[in-house]
Amino acid sequence: MTIHIKKLKVRQRKAAATVMCAPQLSAMLGCWAATDDIHSIGKCREDAEKLFQCMRTTPMPKKIHKPTINYHLARLGKTIQ
């Protein structure tokens, strides 16, 4: 038995956000938690340098334009008239 539903809309799944330099950041935060080298002068210096290098070389993701509420209201107004 199948059920037919009129005007059923399914939202697309949102893509998972990719976090750039996440391994380097977690390594540095882990080092900070294990040692009290918050200024990255001693033991955490290497992890901090790896993070800074990753941040310098990784390109920024492009912004995806999301329509504003005004855009949707204008579209709705065209269909009502």
Image: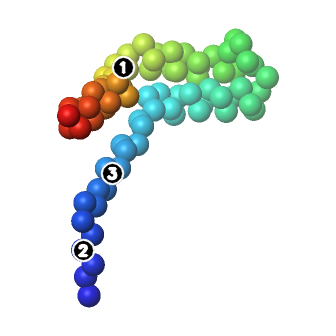
Q: Quadrant of residue 78?
A: top left
Question: Disc 2 and disc 3: Cα gap in Å?
Answer: 18 Å
Question: Is residue 63 among what the camera can see?
Answer: yes
Q: Residue at x 68, y 15 (%)?
A: 40
60 sits to left or right of 45: left
24 sits to left or right of 57: right
Amino acid at dot 3? Arg
Q: Mark 2 sits on what residue?
A: 4
Upstream in the sequence, badge 1 or badge 2? 2
Residue at the farthest front position? 81
63 sits to left or right of 43: left
Q: Mark 1 sits on what residue?
A: 60
Q: Residue at x 42, y 13 (%)?
A: 56
Amino acid at dot 2? His
Could you say whether the residue bearing mark 2 is in a helix, strand or loop?
A: loop
Mark 3 crowdedness (10 Å alpha carbons): few <14, some 14-19, many ≥20: few
Q: Residue at x 37, y 44 (%)?
A: 14
Task: Quadrant for the N terminus, please.
Answer: bottom left
Upstream in the sequence, badge 1 or badge 3? 3
Amino acid at dot 1? Met
Colour option used: rainbow
Question: Is residue 64 among what the camera can see?
Answer: no
Q: Position of residue 50 (x, y in %)?
A: 51, 20
Task: Quadrant for the C terminus, please.
Answer: top left
Do tag 1 and tag 2 residues touch (Cβ < 8 Å)?
Answer: no
**Of residues 46 and 62, which is closer to you in this image?**
62
Q: Mark 3 sits on what residue?
A: 11
Could you say whether the residue bearing mark 3 is in a helix, strand or loop?
A: loop
